[in-house]
Image (cartoon, rainbow, N blue to C red):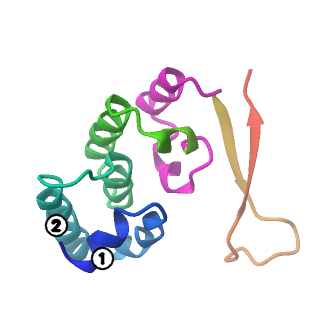
Amino acid sequence: MGEPARRLNTPDGSRGIVPLMGDPAKASQILAELAQDSKRNYVSPYRVANIYTALGDKDEAFAWLERAYDDRSHLLVFMNIDPRVDSLRNDARFVDLVRRVGLPHCEVQRFVASGTDANEPSTMRLGQKN
């Protein structure tokens, strides 16, 4: 397995996912390496889902999130606050998965504080939805 794929499959490996958004060829290479490695080692389905989410492939992302659910991945408990899955939040499959995991359904709102540059990273606020 190549070094980028090896780093993605470590506890802090998801940090390497964001740069893949702009490089689909690199993402595809890493996905192939992870597929090969999964024949010998555990590969986190949640991390694979993050790669597909970064690539904009929601169907594949949800397929891998379902695998994470089947594997009882501990990483699923972060779904409500993980910014890497923001693009999936409005999908009924996401809401259903959050319910099945046993998490409260939260509405995540992104906002930029007044007086800050609109290009600055936004902050996140969780609000319980009734």
- Residue segment shown in magenta: 79-104
Q: Is residue 10 above or below residue 39?
A: below
Q: Which residue: 25% across, 69% down?
A: 27
Q: Earlier in the sequence, mark 2 or mark 1?
A: 1
Instruction: Determine which residue is flagged by label 1.
Output: 4
Q: CA distance from mark 2 to mark 1?
A: 9 Å
- Judge by depth and name the residue closer to the eye, 61 or 100: 100
Q: Is residue 82 above or below residue 105?
A: below
Q: Is residue 22 above or below residue 86?
A: below
Which amino acid, by three-letter code, is at mark 2? Glu
Instruction: Determine which residue is flagged by label 2.
Output: 33
Asked whether disc 2 touches disc 1, contact meaning CB atoms under 8 Å apart, the reply is yes
For label 1, the crowd category at 10 Å Cα-Cα, with few meaning under 14, some 14 to 19 and many 20 or more, is some
- Work out which residue is located at the far front of the displayed protein and give it: 40
Does the magenta run of residues contain 101?
A: yes
Q: Which residue: 35% across, 75% down?
A: 22
Which amino acid, by three-letter code, is at mark 1? Pro
Q: Which mark is residue 65?
A: none
Give left or right: position of 76 versus 3: right
Q: Which residue: 50% across, 56% down?
A: 84
Q: Position of residue 44 (x, y in %)?
A: 33, 50
Give left or right: position of 54 versus 122: left
Does the magenta run of residues contain 31?
A: no
Q: Which residue: 67% across, 37% down?
A: 107
